[in-house]
Each structure stands twice: as structure tokens, then as C-alpha cells.
């Protein structure tokens, strides 16, 4: 049931926004109704928008959308049909190749000695299955991940299950699992480890879906994820006696596998060869239904496409809408698109990304670029009545905007309040009932209005930076340059 306060807030937001936009966007082309295009956009999203229904359908009908899976392909076809239903003039898909398809089977594990106790345990993503009957062995705790440390402890590692308790290398940052993969997994296999246990970082033995690898390939050893409190118990027990554990799971693995990015285009009126690109990732993890990661982002892109296509007058520049695959395995879909279309990157005026859930909107992250921040100043007045006029220089590149940012393309990453999002991120609780519909519609309006303003602006937002200039931003953000090199980006 829709509550009265929600409706009142939504209507208030619309009328304030409409008045503000009409005042601020004096240079808009006026539609036949007398409204400015940005006012029409806001109205169509806030009052008659479909963002909520998009999230609910994507969540409840499809749910888990692991890249390469049959359900992901069904969701991709659903997205194609949504774009076509909304009369986008060109809708198509582009395929990229993942090394392996993977789906999780239920896992189980237990401490066998010096006491018996079940473990909160699941397979890490893209981990191979355990042998039939599982893996059983003594546990060795490692507190560092570098190869020299591992080499110095071969005697303790060989024939053991390794518990990676390198707390400084774990956490919410997206680079942590890549660092573990490159720094430790192969070295541990070469040292004779039987398998790997990786602690989660949340209280109450809660598990966050995570990957064992960066690139969609299988890890060299069976990698199990266990609850934080379980891991601390094993570590305490191991300080006094030998700890023995066992665990088992049998994942479904196949590949290589083709995955589709879904793309729709709205040609510009006078400058069709210049592009604004709006993107969100369609794939999700499998503990829940991926409603906020990233069903809400998908819904915002679809809602923006619907509203922009319905305008009586198109903006000057073209707008491309892309729903990416493989984001959770390392921005695979967006990176593949960049490799395929590298010669076109100079035609992208800005890439707009949404992948932070449906929290209260704050504005845009400009990924460390002062020139982008300056170019956004004239647009901020259009977004203030939705509390979306903030600009942050924080450098994140933790989603599909990352590869664009590292190629020097001007990037805007939708900046929202993430407290509620982080409570469900990659967890079993990421379901439709957690989505704040008012914030979702506000974020959709901010995305659409920003895209129109940039597409219809007489000036480009900023130039594409060269490799040296991007390197200065990366170094200024204290990003691990060695890690970026491991991931294929050298600065």
C-alpha cells in the first residue's frame, strides 16, 4: 500500500522541482506545451515513471543474475524488450567472452578438532568445487599475503587448509579481492595448500557474496568464505592446539561463455556523432535478488531512456544507454566495450554511471577532475530541488565508470547516501522491499535531467585526458599502482 506521506512528499518534490527547473533552465528549447524539456522529464519520471515497477519486476521475476547464467540472459532479453517497448529507435546487444560460467551450490563445513562446531560457510564466487567427500585437513593461519611471506612458511602450508587472516588486505574496497588473488592464491597452490578459507568482514557471521578471482576465471584452489566470528574462533583455537576443519561444495562450472551488454541509442538532433553515455550493470550476486546492486541502477537508466525518448524535441547530442554484464567479476562488460570501441572514446562527452542503490541523492562524483566539476556548475541549479546538486572530487572507480575514468573520459558517478545500501550490499537482504521509491525516482530524475542538459549544451563538459593526466589523478588518490598494473592499467 502507498502511504499518504509518501505521495505528499513525491508531489511536493515534483512541483518544487518543476518551478526550479523552469527558472534555472532559461536556455531550454520550449516544448509545444510551454514546458521546458527538463521540466517535462522531471514530471514524467516523478509522477508517471516506471522505475519502481522495473526494479520490482527485475527483482521478483528474475532475482539472481550471475553473468553467464541462463537467468542473466533472460534478464538481458527483458531489458531489450523494455527499451523497445519504450520506443528507443535502436536497441541491440554486444557480446563479450568470460573465461568461465559459474553457479553456486550450497556449502557446508565444520570444525572437527579440538572441538566440533558447524561453520557459517559458502563457496567464494568462481571457486572450483571441492572433491567429492570434501576437503579435510589442519588449518594454518596466515597474517600476510605477499609471496615472500608465503615462501617462508611452505612447511606450515603444505597439506594444510589456509585461513587468510591478513586483516589489512581485507575490507569493503573493491581492490581487496584482486590483491588476494594476485598476491596469494597461486603462491599458496605452489606451496602445497589444500584449500583456502577467507573470513568475511561483517558481524554475526554474516556473509557477503564475493569473488575468488578478478576476471571471471576459476581460482586455482577451492576457496570458501566463512563468517568473521568463526574465523576468529579458529584463530584463537590455533594458538593453543591444532585445528582441523572440513568443508564441501559442488559448484556448476562451464565455459568459456558469451555474455551480452544491452545497448539502446537515441540519436541527437544536430550533433549525432557526439555521445552522452548512461550506464548501470545488469548482473548481480546470488545471495538475494540484486535489488539495490544493481536493480535500482538498471531501473534509473530505463526510466531515463523512457522519459528522454518521449520528449517532443530531442537534444543536440546522441544519448546511449548501456546495461553492462560482468561488473561483479571486474568490470568485464564495460572493459570489453572500451576495447571494442576505443577509437570512439573521444566522441563521448560524458559517461554517467549509477551503481550505489536508491539512497537519498546528493549529486555527482567527478572522479577527481576539477575541469568536470567546473563544467557542471551551470547544471547544478537544475538539480538543487532534488537535493542532487552536490559535487564530490572523490576518486572511486569502483564500478563500470572506472574503465572510462582510466581512459580519460569525463565521468560522473551518481552520488547517493549509502548507509542503507551497505546494510544489504551483496547480502541475502538485498530485496525489493528495501528500496526507497521516492529516492529511486529522484535519482532517476537527476540522471535524466543531467543527461539532457549535457546533451543539449553548446559546450563539451571537458576534454578526454591523456594517459599522463589520468596518472596524476590516480597517484593523487593514493591508489595502489602495482595493483592497477596487475589489473592491466599501468601509470
Image (cartoon, grey):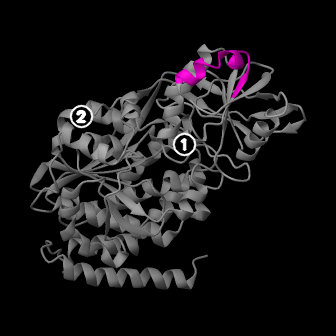
Indicate whether 35 appears above or below 220.
below
Residue 326: image location, x then y, percent: 45, 37
Nearer the camera: disc 2 or disc 1:
2
Quarter of the view holding residue 451: bottom left
Residue 43: image location, x then y, percent: 33, 75
Label ID, residue 65: 1
Query: At 79% from the left edge and 34% from the top edge, which residue is drawn?
Result: 239
Q: Estimate the spatial distance between the alpha carbons at disc 2 and disc 1, rounded to whole Å.
A: 26 Å
Q: Tell which circle, 2 or 1, labels the residue nearer the N-terminal end.
A: 1
Query: At 79% from the left edge and 39% from the top edge, which residue is drawn?
Result: 236
Query: At 56% from the left edge and 57% from the top edge, which residue is drawn?
Result: 422
Indicate whether 306 appears above or below 271.
below
Disc 1 crowd rating (10 Å Cα; few below 14, some 14-19, many 20+) is many
Q: From the viewer's perspective, tell me whether residue 45 is left or right of residue 423.
A: left
Indicate whether 88 appears above or below 408.
below
Task: Report if residue 156 lies within the magenta region.
Answer: yes
Residue 259: image location, x then y, percent: 44, 32
Query: At 51% from the left edge and 58% from the top edge, which residue is drawn?
Result: 55
Label ID, residue 341: 2
Look at the image and give the residue range highlighted in magenta. 147-162
Q: From the viewer's perspective, tell me whether residue 311 is left or right of residue 422.
A: left
Q: Name the residue nearer the viewer: 370 or 150.
A: 150
Residue 464: image location, x then y, percent: 17, 45
Amino acid at each position: 500500500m502507498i502511504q499518504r506521506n509518501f505521495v505528499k512528499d513525491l508531489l511536493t518534490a515534483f512541483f518544487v522541482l518543476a518551478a526550479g527547473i523552469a527558472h534555472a533552465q532559461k536556455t531550454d528549447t520550449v516544448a509545444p506545451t510551454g514546458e521546458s524539456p527538463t521540466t517535462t522529464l522531471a514530471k514524467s519520471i516523478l509522477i508517471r515513471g516506471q522505475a519502481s515497477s522495473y526494479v520490482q519486476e527485475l527483482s521478483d521475476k528474475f532475482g539472481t543474475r550471475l553473468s553467464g547464467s541462463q537467468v542473466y540472459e533472460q534478464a538481458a532479453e527483458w531489458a531489450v524488450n523494455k527499451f523497445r517497448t519504450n520506443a528507443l529507435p535502436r536497441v541491440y546487444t554486444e557480446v563479450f567472452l568470460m573465461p568461465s560460467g559459474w553457479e553456486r551450490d550450497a556449502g557446508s563445513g565444520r570444525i572437527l578438532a579440538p572441538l566440533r562446531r558447524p561453520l557459517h560457510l559458502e563457496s567464494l564466487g568462481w571457486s572450483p568445487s571441492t572433491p567429492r567427500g570434501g576437503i579435510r585437513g589442519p588449518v594454518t593461519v596466515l597474517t600476510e599475503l605477499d609471496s615472500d611471506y608465503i615462501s617462508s612458511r611452505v612447511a606450515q602450508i603444505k597439506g594444510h587448509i589456509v585461513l587468510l587472516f591478513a586483516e589489512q588486505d581485507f575490507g569493503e574496497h573493491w581492490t581487496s579481492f584482486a590483491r588476494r588473488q594476485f598476491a596469494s592464491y597461486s603462491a599458496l597452490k605452489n606451496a602445497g595448500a589444500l584449500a583456502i578459507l577467507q573470513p568475511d568482514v561483517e558481524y554475526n557471521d554474516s556473509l557477503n557474496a564475493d569473488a575468488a578471482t578478478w576476471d571471471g576465471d576459476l581460482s586455482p584452489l577451492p576457496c570458501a568464505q566463512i563468517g568473521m566470528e568463526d574465523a576468529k574462533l579458529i584463530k584463537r583455537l590455533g594458538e593453543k592446539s591444532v585445528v582441523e576443519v572440513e568443508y564441501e561444495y559442488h559448484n556448476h562450472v562451464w565455459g568459456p561463455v558469451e555474455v551480452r551488454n544491452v545497448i539502446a541509442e537515441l540519436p541527437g538532433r544536430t550533433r549525432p556523432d557526439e555521445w552522452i553515455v548512461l550506464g548501470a550493470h545488469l548482473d548481480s550476486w546470488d545471495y538475494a535478488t540484486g535489488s539495490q546492486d544493481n536493480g535500482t541502477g538498471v531501473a534509473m537508466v530505463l526510466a531515463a531512456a523512457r522519459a528522454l525518448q518521449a520528449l517532443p524535441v530531442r537534444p543536440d547530442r546522441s544519448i546511449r544507454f548501456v546495461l553492462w554484464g560482468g561488473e561483479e567479476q571486474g568490470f568485464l562488460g564495460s572493459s570489453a566495450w572500451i576495447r571494442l570501441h576505443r577509437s570512439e572514446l573521444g566522441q563521448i562527452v560524458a559517461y554517467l554511471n549509477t551503481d550505489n542503490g536508491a539512497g537519498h541523492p546528493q549529486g555527482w562524483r567527478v572522479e577527481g577532475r576539477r575541469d568536470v566539476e567546473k563544467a557542471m556548475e551551470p547544471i547544478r541549479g537544475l538539480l538543487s530541488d532534488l537535493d542532487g546538486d552536490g559535487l564530490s572530487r572523490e576518486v572511486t572507480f569502483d564500478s563500470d565508470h572506472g574503465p572510462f575514468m582510466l581512459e580519460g573520459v569525463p565521468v560522473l558517478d551518481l552520488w547517493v547516501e549509502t548507509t542503507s545500501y551497505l546494510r544489504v550490499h551483496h547480502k541475502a537482504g538485498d530485496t525489493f522491499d528495501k528500496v526507497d521509491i521516492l529516492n529511486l525516482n529522484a535519482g532517476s530524475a537527476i540522471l535524466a535531467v543531467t543527461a539532457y542538459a549535457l546533451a543539449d549544451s553548446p559546450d563539451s563538459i571537458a576534454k578526454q585526458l591523456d594517459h599522463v593526466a589520468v596518472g596524476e589523478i590516480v597517484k593523487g588518490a593514493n591508489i595502489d599502482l602495482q595493483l592497477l598494473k596487475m589489473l592491466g592499467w599501468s601509470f
